[in-house]
Amino acid sequence: MRKLTGWPLFFALIFLASSCKSAFEQTRTSGNSELILTSAFNYYEKKNYQRALTLLELVVNTLRGDARAEKAYFEYAQCHYQTNQYLLAAFYFKNFSSTFSNSPLREEAAYMSAYSNYKLSPSFRLDQKATETAIEEFQLFVNLFPTSDKVSQCNKLIDELRRKLEQKAFDEGQLYFNLRQFQSAVISFDNLLRDYPESPDVERVRYLIAKASLLLAENSVVEKKVERYGTTITKCNDFLEKYRSGNYSKEVKQIRKDAQVAQKEIKLKLKNT
């Protein structure tokens, strides 16, 4: 039997490679927009999102004015979500919601835009931009679709995300405290109380404010000690007014006593100089 060599062998290999090309690859490289779009829809129905996405990317921008554009754009966004590309999913769902304002899929797209940002929300120790964006979008969804059956879920997720921001704020205040930057700690904790007055950590935060205020006063120059001890006493009084029998009431009473004694001594010292 004669063996193929040279050019005959080369063309035989080319033919063999092309004949072995998968149906997906044949569709992808066909240049036939109709075939590509139909195949993309079929892959999506079969939940083969990666192949559907690959094909949709070839034709989605050519569908302006096409009756199938709405379906294609929504599935394009969904494919990004299903392949864990949450940043792009959030972008395309939001774009769909604004572009197809009369679509019955608009509500789902608006929710998925927010939920994609929710999936991007990292540990509270990291930057919380995605968390803030998710909260904004969930709130926008609730405002736009107040009768949606997803409203209760949105509110639940908003609470979860806000708790993460609270943890971030508390962690920052605690870090300042541990670094002995007591003024920054007080400011950070005060901001936490202002932004999250219903936080379950409020009692502990008020205790740390009182403690940081005392340490700030103790480490201040003489000219500022009287005022800062006075601030500490006020912070302690605020705490004891709200939590007279709280978990930290004993410690706070001692902080107030220490501040009162120290303030009296400084006043006497300044009077005699």
Image: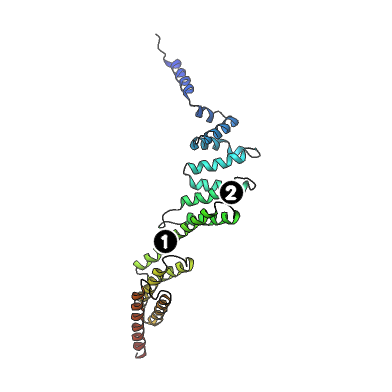
Type of amino acid at the residue the image marks with label 1: Gln
- How many other residues sit within 10 Å of disc 1, few (<14), some (14-19) or many (≥20)? some
Where residue 38 appears, as percent x and y from the top left, is 58, 32
Q: Give the residue at x 61% y 49%.
A: 98
Relative height, residue 89 to residue 198 (above, below): above
Q: Residue furthest bottom?
A: 272
At 46% from the left and 20% from the top, the residue drawn is 16
Residue beneath label 2, please? 107
Instruction: Say what secondary structure mark 2 lies in.
Output: helix
The residue under the point 52% across, 34% down is: 43
Q: Considering the image in quadrants, where does the N terminus appear?
A: top left
The quadrant holding residue 2 is top left
Question: Eyeballing the image, is 164 above or below 272?
Answer: above
Give whichever of 157, 97 is nearer the camera.
157
Asked whether residue 133 appears in the rendered view, the answer is no
Image label count: 2
On screen, residue 41 above or below 101: above
Which residue is denoted by mark 1 in the rendering?
167
Tell me, for residue 185, which label it has, or none.
Answer: none
Circle 1 or circle 2, nearest the eye: 2
- Left or right of residue 163, residue 60 in this image: right
Q: Tag 2 or tag 1, which sits nearer the N-term?
A: 2
